């Protein structure tokens, strides 16, 4: 259908938008390198997860067609491989162009052939002393076993000739003993990569053989594993699966430049890969080294303007965070405001507050040195009831979460895992504290992003802190369900998947459809990361056909195409890709006014979120906070620097800047955070000055002992006269 698109092809368009940042002249040069690396890292994960999954489906006897595009899994794979191949020249050109411009600042990635004689001599000595002792070459032929090639590791492969015939030689090109970047200048800007040196001197690893061809290769393996379970054995099962994932089947082979067709066919045969899964490149196979290059030059021209999260203007230093939340709801916005000076502060205060009786939280992804874990362990060690639902199936964070779960248990925390067949992706915290006059007070936190101090400086997210008792009751119901392995069916305020989120979202959309059909101005808006839930898409189409205005900001994959006559002509879709990863989720139903409903939460409009995960969204009821979110959404809708608009063809184009002054929404929000804090500091300074002036004025009027004596004498005389009149 012309208004629907396959999710995989839509995701590849998103990654193309990421790559555009690597060529944007307004992106500083060293920052462009990051986007090239991010593009490649995204694609690696895409092949590991999505291509791995579709490959398994393609092996089934009956291939089920994609509900949006009508393609079978095999057809989807063909389309994916074609799209990736078409992008490769742009990927290579982006890196070449950036490195070319960086040459003016001394950066030069050289090949061995372009090195000076002195440098070549140094590299040969470096190979012999620093690399050769730590790597070993393996000869492979039909009489010898084929070695296991690790996921995403680089290997040097050579075609070898001897009296016995032709063989293949394989050398691991990643060593833990050396840096991947081999510096050839004092500032490190002139360099060559470790794997390039190993490939150049590979012949020294194979005596009695002649090297007749050579190349670098990199295998990507499937990561499509899923486990179910809840009990004590579940963690052990997850440890086994994580280990197993390292040995799953290859789904892609990358190779540098041109290599012998016979040797390549032999490799594919041993890896059980078809040639269509071989992708050649003329740039390094692993671009993660580009992040390191950013450290070699601090020239401000080459970097983004420095930004650091501000202290939240809504919070005071003089009172505990819990008390401030009791007074009013607080909305926090990351990375513009500091998670350490807000959420982490709340958690640390709660851990050490003798009146706090319990802390309950859901964890999905955490920072390496997590202050969240430290606070939870402290709370448990001080005798508080601490319940942690930690999701062991968080993709690529399984090992970390397994270790965190062990550490929490050792500290006395009650640790549970997600429901048997469902991931718990919610960002939910409930703190219970003894009230002064008896009973208990509650603070509930609901967010759009993980409790991760590192990503909170890189991702845009929202977090609501509230003392609303009804919301606390709903949160308690969520934790009770998680504890029992069941699901919340009914709530009063929170939206909770898999049973009590999508039906409510569809019902609120129906309200806007009914309003439009009765002549009103129906309105639906959302800011999400992805859109592919069939029921929600169908409802959005119905809303558009009924005349409801629909504004969607969808960062990544989007299976709905906007602006198609007769179906989605009242829908606009835009994507913002910039310095920070757009990650917040906002749901809006209705135009401005008291009937408008606004939510933030952890769920995207994807089936995996709405019906196969535990997700939580919370209503924004404080009018000041509602206005703040409306204003944020309007600013993002006006972004004409980092926003791309979806056309009715499904392609994306940059917003036209001719519509007004350039507006980068991410930079706007950072400036706003700085300004709010400055305004608050200015007000506090004025208050301090006024207090000092008042104190001096009072001090100046303060009566002396002589003045007091005269005043008393006069008062006594007046009282005497008054008595005489009586």
Image: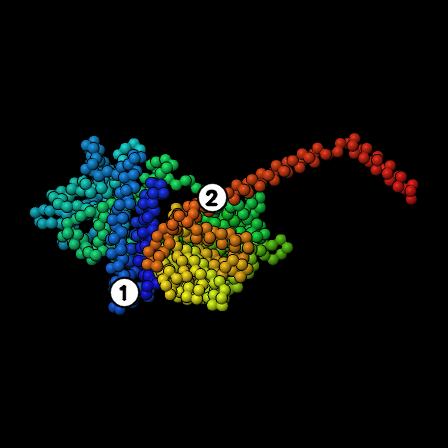
In the image, 544: left or right of 314? left
Q: Please, what secondary structure does the residue beneath circle 2 have?
A: helix
**Quadrant housing the N terminus:** bottom left
Disc nearer the start of the sequence (1/2): 1
Residue under circle 2? 671
Q: Residue at x 37, y 60 (%)?
A: 563
Vertical arrangement, residue 235 with respect to residue 660, above or below: below
Vertical arrangement, residue 128 with respect to residue 539, above or below: above
Residue 652 location, quadrant: bottom left
Residue 268, image x, y percentages = 19, 55
Name the one closer to the observer, 581 or 375.
581
Name the one closer to the observer, 670 or 618.
670
User: Badge 1 local density, few (<14 within 10 Å), some, or many (20+)?
Assistant: some
**Can the viewer see residue 450?**
no
In the image, 424: left or right of 350? left
Name the one closer to the observer, 184 or 298.
298
Residue under circle 1? 72
User: Badge 2 local density, few (<14 within 10 Å), some, or many (20+)?
Assistant: few
Q: Please, what secondary structure does the residue beneath circle 1 have?
A: loop
Q: Residue at x 75, y 32 (%)?
A: 704
Vertical arrangement, residue 494 with respect to residue 342, above or below: below
Residue 538, image x, y percentages = 39, 66
Q: Residue at x 69, y 35 (%)?
A: 697
Furthest residue in direction front, as rendered: 658
- Looking at the image, how many numbered discs can be counted on the residues? 2
Q: Nearer the viewer, mark 1 or mark 2?
A: 2
Residue 76, image x, y percentages = 27, 61
Residue 606 location, quadrant: bottom left
Vertical arrangement, residue 388 with respect to residue 204, above or below: below
**Quadrant housing the C terminus:** top right
Residue 703, image x, y percentages = 75, 33
């Amino acid at each position: 259908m012309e208004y629907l698109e396959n999710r995989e092809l839509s995701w590849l368009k998103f990654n193309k938008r990421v790559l555009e940042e690597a060529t944007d002249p307004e992106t500083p040069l060293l920052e462009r390198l990051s986007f090239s690396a991010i593009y490649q890292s995204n694609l690696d994960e895409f092949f590991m997860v999505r291509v791995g999954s579709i490959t398994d489906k393609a092996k089934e006897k009956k291939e089920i067609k994609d509900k949006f595009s009508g393609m079978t899994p095999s057809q989807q794979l063909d389309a994916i491989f074609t799209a990736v191949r078409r992008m490769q020249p742009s990927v290579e050109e982006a890196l070449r162009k950036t490195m070319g411009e960086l040459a003016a600042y001394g950066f030069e990635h050289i090949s061995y052939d372009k090195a000076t004689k002195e440098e070549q001599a140094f590299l040969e000595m470096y190979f012999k002393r620093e690399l050769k002792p730590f790597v070993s070459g393996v000869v492979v032929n039909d009489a010898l076993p084929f070695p296991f090639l690790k996921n995403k590791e680089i290997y040097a492969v050579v075609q070898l000739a001897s009296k016995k015939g032709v063989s293949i030689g394989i050398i691991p090109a990643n060593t833990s003993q050396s840096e991947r970047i081999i510096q050839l200048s004092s500032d490190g800007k002139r360099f060559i990569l470790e794997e390039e040196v190993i490939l150049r001197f590979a012949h020294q690893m194979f005596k009695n053989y002649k090297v007749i061809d050579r190349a670098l290769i990199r295998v990507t393996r499937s990561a499509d594993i899923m486990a179910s379970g809840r009990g004590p054995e579940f963690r052990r099962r997850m440890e086994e699966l994580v280990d197993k994932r390292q040995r799953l089947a290859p789904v892609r082979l990358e190779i540098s430049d041109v290599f012998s067709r016979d040797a390549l066919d032999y490799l594919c045969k041993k890896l059980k890969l078809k040639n269509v899964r071989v992708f050649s490149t003329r740039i390094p196979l692993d671009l993660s080294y580009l992040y390191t290059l950013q450290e070699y030059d601090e020239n401000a021209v080459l970097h983004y303007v420095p930004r650091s999260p501000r202290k939240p203007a809504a919070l005071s230093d003089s009172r505990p965070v819990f008390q401030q939340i009791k007074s009013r709801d607080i909305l926090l916005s990351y990375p513009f405001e500091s998670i350490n000076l807000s959420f982490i502060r709340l958690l640390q205060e709660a851990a050490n507050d003798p009146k706090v009786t319990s802390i309950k939280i859901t964890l999905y992804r955490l920072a390496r040195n997590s202050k969240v874990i430290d606070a939870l362990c402290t709370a448990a060690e001080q005798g508080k009831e601490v319940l942690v639902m930690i999701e062991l199936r968080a993709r690529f964070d399984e090992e970390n979460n397994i270790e965190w779960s062990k550490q929490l248990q050792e500290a006395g925390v009650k640790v549970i895992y997600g429901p048997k067949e469902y991931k718990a992706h919610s960002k939910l915290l409930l703190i219970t504290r003894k009230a002064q006059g008896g009973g208990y007070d509650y603070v509930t936190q609901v967010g759009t992003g993980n409790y991760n101090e590192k990503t909170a400086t890189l991702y845009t997210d929202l977090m609501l802190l509230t003392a609303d008792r009804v919301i606390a009751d709903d949160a308690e119901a969520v934790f009770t369900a998680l504890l029992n392995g069941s699901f919340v069916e009914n709530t009063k305020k929170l939206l909770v998947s898999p049973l009590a989120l999508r039906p409510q979202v569809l019902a609120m959309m129906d309200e806007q459809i009914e309003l439009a059909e009765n002549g009103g101005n129906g309105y639906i808006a959302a800011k999400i990361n992805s859109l592919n839930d069939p029921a929600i898409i169908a409802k959005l189409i119905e809303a558009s056909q009924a005349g409801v205005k629909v504004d969607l900001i969808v960062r990544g994959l989007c299976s709905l195409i906007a602006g198609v006559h007769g179906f989605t002509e009242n829908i606009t879709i835009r994507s913002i890709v910039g310095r920070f990863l757009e990650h917040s989720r906002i749901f809006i139903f209705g135009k401005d006014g008291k009937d408008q409903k606004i939510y933030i939460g952890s769920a995207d409009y994807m089936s995996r979120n709405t019906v196969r995960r535990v997700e939580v969204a919370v209503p924004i009821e404080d009018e000041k906070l509602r206005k703040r979110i409306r204003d944020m959404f309007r600013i993002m809708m006006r972004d004409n620097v980092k926003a791309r608009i979806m056309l009715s063809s499904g392609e994306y184009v940059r917003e036209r800047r001719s519509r007004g002054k350039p507006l980068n929404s991410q930079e706007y929000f950072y400036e706003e955070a700085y300004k709010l804090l400055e305004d608050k500091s200015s007000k506090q300074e004025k208050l301090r000055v006024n207090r000092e002036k008042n104190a001096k004025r009072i001090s100046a009027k303060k009566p002396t002992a002589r003045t007091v004596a005269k005043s008393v004498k006069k008062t006594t005389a007046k009282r005497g006269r008054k008595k005489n009149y009586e």
